[in-house]
Image (cartoon, rainbow, N blue to C red):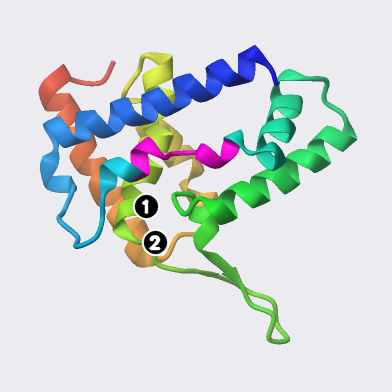
Amino acid sequence: MSKEYDEYLKEHCANVRKGFYWIRRSLPEVLIDIPGVDYELNILLHDDTKYNNDEYDAYDEYFYGKKSKDSEKKMRYAFQNHIHQNPHHWQHWVHITDNGKPSVIALDMPYEYIIEMICDWWSFSWKSGDVFEIFDWYEENKKTMKLSKRTRDTVEDILDKLEKKLIKVRGPRK
């Protein structure tokens, strides 16, 4: 266990919550009422699996230890485990067929995980101190994301509302 990784996890999860609470306070219409969905519980449990040994040790070694071919291999397995246990990652919703012709199909993400995914992405903007950074990051990365049309439309609609609200509250982007 490393102090640096523990501090990173603590800060990351705090920034995910910061983004969520900002949305809840400033853009509540985005948190549509879905029976049985508790957005806040998802946010409070965000990335809990990173504390499990099969993820923690690999992430810690990869980011805060000495990188090696072994640490890279462990990290790939840990990340694979992470995305399969955490549906707020778009990769969780990618299906690879095996019916003779391998292909990749993006499944629709449930709305509550789209919200958590956006808060996860936005957490890095909160860390940097530039809450607008998420929009450039998304533009740079969206082409490599395998999202269904409905999921992409939903993500972009929420990001558009978020950006407009930020501009209204904080002023134009710098």
Quarter of the image that includes the C terminus: top left
The part of the image, by quadrant, that contains residue 61 is: top right
Residue at 17%, 36% in the rendered image? 24
Q: Point out which mark residue 5 bears.
A: none
Q: Position of residue 2 (x, y in %)?
A: 68, 17
41 in relation to 173, above or below: below
Q: Are marks 2 and 1 in contact (CB under 8 Å)?
A: yes
Q: Between residues 144 and 128, which one lies in front from this camera angle?
A: 128
**Residue at (28, 56) in percent of width and height:** 154
- Horizontally, is 173 left or right of 70 in the view? left
Residue picked out by circle 1 = 113
Residue 144: percent from the left, percent from the top? 55, 51
Is residue 136 left or right of 103 when viewed as pictured? left
CA distance for labels 2 and 1: 7 Å
Residue 10, compared with residue 42, is above or below; it is above
Is 174 one of the magenta-colored residues? no
Q: State which quadrant residue 76 falls in.
A: top right
Q: Nearer the viewer, residue 95 or 171?
A: 95
Kindly identify which residue carries mark 2.
109
Q: What amino acid type is highlighted by mark number 2?
A: Met
Helix, strand or loop under label 1: helix
Q: Residues within 10 Å of mark 2 (few under 14, many from 20)?
A: many
For the stretch drawn in magenta, the main secondary structure is: helix
Please tell me which residue is depicted at 82% across the width and 25% down the height of the picture. 67
Residue stretch rendered in magenta on the structure? 42-50
Q: Residue furthest right?
A: 69
At label 1, counting other C-alpha atoms closer than 10 Å, the crowd grade (few under 14, some 14-19, many 20 or more) is some
Where disc 2 sits, the SS reads loop
- Residue 117 lies left or right of residue 157; in this view the side is right
**In the rendering, at what x and y percent does residue 30 appear?**
17, 47
